[in-house]
Amino acid sequence: IVRGMRVHVDQEKCQGHNRCVALAPDLFEVDDYGTAWVKGAGVVPEGQEEAARLALDNCPEYAITITDD
Ligand code: F3S
């Protein structure tokens, strides 16, 4: 089990604003339909925590969530 911070995208809410990818390209990618997905099962590598929070704060659809365990 991998512990630590993880990002999640709710594809039902995502409208393809792309800010998550612009702010945290190591954590998010967008598919051909403009829907965002997390990379690497959403595991946030050390040093990427701030980028993850930035993406969460800047998604206009509130599609991004962060869990920390
Ligand atoms: Fe979607 Fe929000 Fe990113 S709408 S593309 S999760 S900024």
Image (cartoon, grey):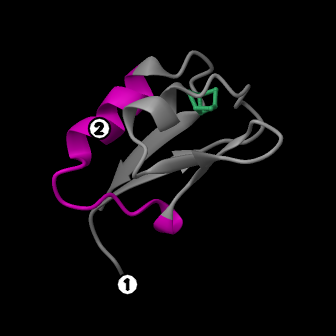
Amino acid residing under circle 1: Ile
- Dot 2: what SS? helix
Whether residue 17 sits left or right of residue 52 in the image: it is right
Q: Main secondary structure of the magenta part?
A: helix
Tell me the number on the disc at residue 1: 1
Image region (quadrant) for ligand 1: top right
For image coordinates 16% across by 52% down, the residue present is 47
Whether residue 43 sits left or right of residue 20 in the image: it is left
Whether residue 13 sits left or right of residue 68 in the image: it is right
Amino acid residing under circle 2: Ala
Q: Which residue is mark 2?
A: 51
Q: Nearer the viewer, mark 2 or mark 1?
A: 2
* Foreground pick, 68 / 39: 39
Question: Does residue 63 lie above or below 41 as drawn?
Answer: above
Q: Which residues are magenta?
A: 40-57
Q: What's the distance in space between the residues labelled 2 and 1, CA to CA? A: 23 Å
Q: Is residue 43 magenta?
A: yes
The image quadrant where one finds the C terminus is bottom left
Q: Is residue 65 magenta?
A: no
- Outermost residue on the left side: it is 47
Corner quadrant of residue 55? top left
Instruction: Say if disc 1 is inside 8 Å of ligand 1.
Output: no
Q: Are marks 2 and 1 in contact (CB under 8 Å)?
A: no
The image quadrant where one finds the N terminus is bottom left
Q: Earlier in the sequence, mark 2 or mark 1?
A: 1
